[in-house]
Image (cartoon, helix red, strand yellow):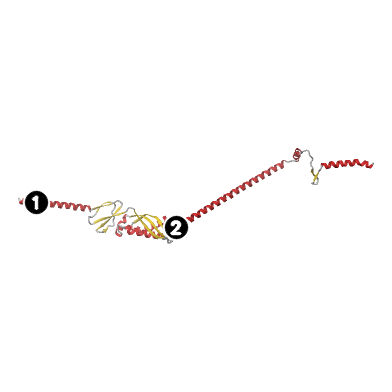
Amino acid sequence: MDINIRDLRANQKKHEFKGIKWIVAGVAALFIAANSFTIVPAGNTGVVLTLGEVNNKPLSEGFHIKVPFAQRVENISNQIQVYETPASAVSKDLQTVSSKIAVNYRLVSDKSPEMYRKVGSDYQTVLIAPAVQECMKSATAKHTAEELITERQSVGDEVKTSLEARLSEYGIYIEKFNIVNFDFSEEFNTAIESKQVAEQNLLKTQTEQKQTELIADTSAKNKRVAANAEADAILAKAKAQAEANKLLEESLSDKVIAYEQIQKWDGVMPKVTGSESGMLIDVDLNSLDGSSQKSQTSQAASPSNNE
């Protein structure tokens, strides 16, 4: 009986050991299987490292088989990323300029293995940040503070071109560069405000002067128009009068004049008449009557004297 019990226990232990071995083998198989493939997410590139060595051929999005334990895959994003940072620089006219900038960039997928080999996955800190600061300082030094304000887009394009030249060799493509804001010293802001006020006052003065000149020109023009109209009216009246006189002169004759004189005579003989010499002689009818009477008296007295 004791022997049978021992045999049973031995067989039981043997079966248990076999079961554990199968469980361990299954777990190991699952673990190996889990490390035999990888999935590269969308918008990423897989960089394969075989025992620490970077494979030059990147993995695209999706499912891939790899050597378990000997290979691992680092996912590098190829999506557009945004890097925002403050920047400080000095302008051409030695004004301190503080700005906030934003860079939209992405990593070209074919360059992902080389980027990982040379820089690693933290290329934003290692490459982009210092390049942005340096390009911003260089571009700012070429422009005055006023130009940075009035030509912001042009300055931004200049910085973008400079960044592309620095980062393209690493496979970093600059999608967009924005200068979000410029900030200057309080003294410069005060000077700009004073200049704007002076320009506005000058513009106001020029506008008022132009309005005054326009009013004066309009008044002078109106006077010239009125004078020309008056002159034209006088000229037209004179021409009409001349034409009327001419027609009147052509229509007059001696008979018409005599007829008009007869029509207008009031029955009184004129006291002034013309002589052949052209002199005017005053004819006094009363004196003529007196002289006649005296002559007649003289003639009547003469015979008595003779007698």
For the question of whether residue 169 can be seen, the reply is no
For the point 16% across and 51% down, the residue is: 23
Residue sitting nearer the eye, 264 or 163: 264
- Amino acid of disc 2: Thr
User: Where residue 86 sits: x, y (%)?
Assistant: 37, 57
User: Where residue 203 sits: x, y (%)?
Assistant: 50, 54
Whether label 2 touches label 1, CB < 8 Å: no
**How many residues crowd mark 2 within 10 Å: few (<14), some (14–19), many (20+)?**
few
Residue sitting nearer the eye, 26 or 53: 26
Does dot 2 land on a helix, a strand or a loop? helix
Mark 2 and mark 1: span between their CA atoms? 98 Å
Mark 1 lies on residue: 9
User: Where residue 10 sits: x, y (%)?
Assistant: 9, 52
Quadrant occupied by the C terminus:
top right
For the point 58% across and 49% down, the residue is: 219
Mark 2 lies on residue: 190
For the point 43% across and 56% down, the residue is: 149
**Left or right of 226: which side holds 76?**
left
- Amino acid of disc 1: Arg
Asked if residue 232 is positioned above or below residue 162 in the image, the reply reads above
Residue lying farthest right?
Answer: 307
Q: Nearer the viewer, mark 2 or mark 1?
A: 2
Residue sitting nearer the eye, 300 or 51: 300
**Left or right of 144: which side holds 305?**
right
Image quarter of residue 66: bottom left
Asked if residue 97 is positioned above or below residue 231 in the image, the reply reads below
User: Where residue 87 sits: x, y (%)?
Assistant: 37, 58
